[in-house]
């Protein structure tokens, strides 16, 4: 009778091969990594880019997580702390407001549903990726010499990742606030169907419902929608003085909208 093993307890082979400039094998490293279901091969080319070959989806993303942790664990630790609001633990009070904002902004919905929104196998993929990262974190616990100098300089140790870290919104506190506002204004003025035509959304068609306050200012709204549409075409409307084909299209959009406001 064939024995069955829990994947988390398996110690299967992960082979890491580094290629030289001529594409020949310069070094081969065989690793026993807990968490793999079948053997995985990683080829690191002359530019340092890893090419992962696995026999199943879970092993593929587990190996990706493990490999990126080997290469960039300190960067991953900074991301984890930013996502969990724990940067102030080593940067002090100057990072406290950001940590507070991050914690207020944490996702508190149905995590499984959220993960599967990105991909039908999202939950499985992200869990495998996180488990791969944590497998390498476990290795650093057993062998602290694997840690890069930054950890020792700051007196910190890497923490474990969770799926919630992967889909954290901490960048939303900085990166796309104005984009979200412009998008909301565009939906209010043009309607969601027109915005669907103008914008490119991934990975799926999101709901673009917003609360309308009923206030419409033709001049202000016209200027706002020029700014939004300019972002879609890449044109600076002021610099080009509404002179080229793309901006003539924008002018037509505004004119059509203003006409629709007439009683």
Image (cartoon, rainbow, N blue to C red):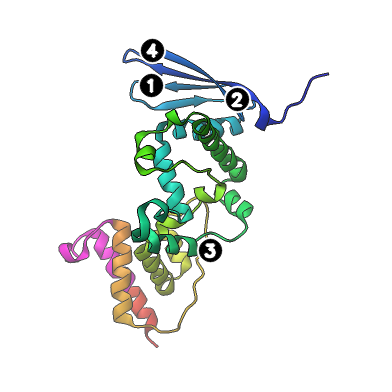
Quarter of the view holding residue 75: top left
Q: Which mark is residue 55?
A: 2
Q: Main secondary structure of the magenta part?
A: helix
Mark 2 surroundings within 10 Å by alpha-carbon count, few (fewer than 14), some (14 through 19), many (20 or more)? few
| Magenta region | 234-254
For the residue pair 203 and 56, the one nearer the viewer reads as 56
Q: Secondary structure at mark 2?
A: loop
Mark 3 surroundings within 10 Å by alpha-carbon count, few (fewer than 14), some (14 through 19), many (20 or more)? few
The reply to whether the magenta stretch includes residue 186 is no
For the residue pair 109 and 250, the one nearer the viewer reads as 109
For the residue pair 130 and 117, the one nearer the viewer reads as 130
Distance between mark 3 and mark 2 Cα atoms: 37 Å
The reply to whether the magenta stretch includes residue 253 is yes
Q: Which mark is residue 26?
A: 4
Q: Secondary structure at mark 3?
A: loop
Foreground tag (3 vs 4): 4
- Sequence order check, earlier mark of 3 and 4: 4
Residue 44 is situated, as x and y percent measured from the top left of the image, at 41, 22
Q: Secondary structure at mark 1?
A: loop
Pointer 2 with pointer 4, Cβ within 8 A = no
Foreground tag (3 vs 1): 1
- The image shows residue 96, relative to residue 139, as above or below, that is below
Name the residue tied to disc 3. Answer: 207
Residue 97 is situated, as x and y percent measured from the top left of the image, at 39, 64
Distance between mark 2 and mark 1 Cα atoms: 20 Å
Q: Residue furthest bottom?
A: 263
Q: Secondary structure at mark 4?
A: strand
Name the residue tied to disc 1. Answer: 45
- Sequence order check, earlier mark of 1 and 4: 4
For the residue pair 227 and 5, the one nearer the viewer reads as 5
- The image shows residue 54, relative to residue 153, as above or below, that is above
**Which quadrant of the figure contains the N terminus?**
top right
């Amino acid at each position: 009778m064939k024995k069955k093993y829990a994947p988390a307890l398996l110690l299967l082979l992960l082979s890491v091969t580094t290629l030289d400039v001529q594409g020949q094998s310069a070094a081969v490293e065989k690793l026993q990594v807990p968490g793999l279901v079948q053997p995985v091969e990683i080829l690191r080319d002359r530019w340092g880019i890893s090419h992962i070959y696995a026999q199943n989806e879970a092993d593929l993303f587990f190996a990706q997580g493990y490999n990126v942790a080997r290469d960039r664990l300190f960067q991953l630790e900074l991301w984890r702390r930013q996502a969990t609001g724990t940067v102030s633990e080593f940067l002090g009070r100057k990072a406290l407001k950001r940590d507070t904002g991050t914690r207020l902004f944490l996702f508190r919905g149905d995590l499984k549903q959220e993960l599967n929104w990105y991909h039908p196998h999202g939950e499985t993929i992200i869990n495998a990726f996180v488990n791969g990262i944590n497998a390498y974190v476990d290795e650093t616990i057993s062998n602290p010499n694997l840690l890069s100098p930054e950890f020792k300089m700051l007196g910190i140790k890497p923490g474990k990742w969770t799926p919630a870290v992967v889909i954290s919104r901490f960048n939303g506190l900085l990166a796309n606030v104005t984009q979200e506002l412009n998008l909301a204004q565009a939906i209010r003025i043009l309607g969601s169907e027109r915005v669907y035509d103008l914008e490119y959304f991934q990975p799926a068609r999101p709901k673009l419902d917003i609360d309308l306050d009923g206030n419409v200012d033709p001049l202000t709204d016209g200027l706002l929608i020029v700014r939004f549409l300019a972002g879609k075409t890449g044109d600076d409307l002021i610099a080009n003085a509404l002179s080229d084909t793309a901006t003539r299209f924008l002018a037509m959009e505004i004119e059509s909208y203003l006409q629709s406001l007439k009683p």
